Amino acid sequence: MQPLLMSHCPYCGWPDDQPAQDLSLHRTAEGAVVWTRCGCGSLQARVLTSGCVRIVTRGRPPA
Ligand SMILES: [Zn+2]
């Protein structure tokens, strides 16, 4: 089970802990980097470390 994110997408208000689509997962020395796409099309990368998740980058939805 993934740790909860309490934030929301600034573009459509979707809860960040329920990404519409998981695109890919990369294991790094820091933890797992997961790319997700929101329902509005905004891409984000989140880093999962032990018991902790944070969003490191978030793109704008396509125009
Ligand atoms: Zn969104």
Image (cartoon, rainbow, N blue to C red):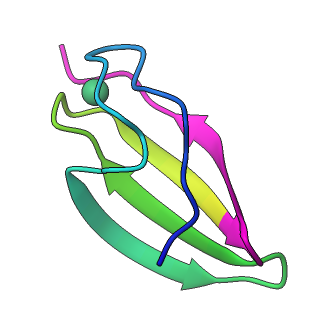
Q: Specify start and end residues of the magenta stretch as a single range.
A: 48-63
Q: Residue furthest right?
A: 29
Q: Quadrant of residue 33?
A: bottom right
Instruction: Give the residue at x 42% y 15%.
Output: 10
Residue 4 x, y percent position in the rendering: 54, 54
Q: Position of residue 6 (x, y in %)?
A: 55, 36
- How many numbered dots are placed on residues in this image? 0
Residue 50 picture location, percent across and down: 77, 78
Snapshot quadrant of residue 53: bottom right
Horizontal arrangement in the rendering, residue 4 relative to residue 23 (left or right): right
Front one among 22 and 17: 17
Q: Is 37 displayed left or right of 28 in the figure?
A: left
Q: Quadrant of the C terminus?
A: top left
Q: Position of residue 47 (x, y in %)?
A: 66, 62
Seen in the picture, residue 9 relative to 39 is either above or below; the reply is above
Describe residue 30's horizontal placement relative to residue 5 as left or right. Answer: right
Q: Can you say whether 26 is above or below 52 in the image?
A: below
Question: Which quadrant does ligand 1 occupy?
Answer: top left
In the figure, 20 relative to 47: above or below? above
Q: Is residue 18 magenta?
A: no
Q: Could you tell me which residue is drawn at 58 percent across and 55 percent down?
A: 46
